[in-house]
Amino acid sequence: MRLLAQLGAVLLVSFASSAVVGLAGWNVPATLVLGLVMAALSLWVYGKVVRWTERRDPAEIAVRGAVPALGRGFLIGGGMFAAVIANIAFLGGYEVLGMGSVGGAVALFGFQAAAVVSEELLFRGILFRFLERGIGTWAALLLSGVLFGAIHMMNPHATVWTSTAIAISAGFMLAAAYAATRNLWVPIGVHFGWNYVQGGIFGASVSGTEAPQGLLDSVTSGPLLVSGGEFGPEASAYAVLAGVVVTVAFMRLAKRRGNIVSRRRRSTPEAALVAQPSR
């Protein structure tokens, strides 16, 4: 019942967020402001429903340490994508034609903020946490990652390969980020950094979706495994490789910090969150 209550509340605000931001019609100030407001509302609803159903303060979204954790996550996610696009460009799969749209980049900031926060609350804040309690960290990472990839099958130009790539490069990696840090700020920052740098800076397609032009007017071309095809660079082999490398790094950190929950132990990691700062 706790799981259903939390999923219901966050899904409801997620659908509302998508509708409200969509009503802005990519108007720059409206999309920016509404996106940030809906992201904040999603976090507030998550905090309320966790307090109500679990009788605890949601330390995974504690304000203390949030800004540096978001910053570290953004640098990791943005750096990952910059490395991916550099490799694609090296093989001729990405070309900058000129300057794009500053307004588009600003609108995408708000749009991605709302989308990323909703996805992280659902998949890492709720699904991964509850799965980890029953089946342990590794199995929860695998299952939540597969579900994250599967939900992207609904995106334009999606295929079995693109969903597999998303599961590996994002689903597993973001769950590992949560396991290592036991807060949602780092995975939110990583996710936002990856998405925003991809679309808002480099002007590439994000998960096959249509969006305004980012800061750079660019074009991708070449084989699917190099450029990601119409779905965007997330479907490239470079994105998958980057996701694997960062997942391994986060899981090694989680193991070193004693954050791996075994299936037999099945402890509640949230009990250790109360006194644990964002990292």
Image (cartoon, rainbow, N blue to C red):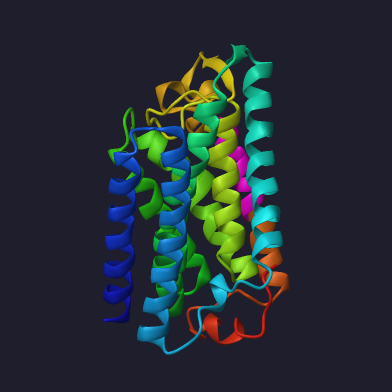
Left or right, residue 80 beside residue 171: right
Q: In this view, does 168 lie above or below 220?
A: below
Left or right, residue 180 beside residue 204: right
Farthest-out residue, bottom: 55
Q: Residue at x 55, y 38 (%)?
A: 196
Q: Is residue 133 magenta?
A: no
Q: Residue at x 60, y 32 (%)?
A: 238
Count of labels shown? Answer: 0
**Image position, residue 223 (x, y; %):** 49, 17
The magenta span reads 237-247
Q: Which of 150 and 190 is in front in this view?
A: 190
Q: Which of 147 and 63 is in front in this view?
A: 63
Q: Which residue is drawn at 47% across and 61% down?
A: 40
**Image position, residue 138 (x, y; %):** 51, 66
Q: Residue at x 60, y 29 (%)?
A: 201
Q: Is residue 267 above or below residue 140?
A: below
Left or right, residue 277 beside residue 182: right
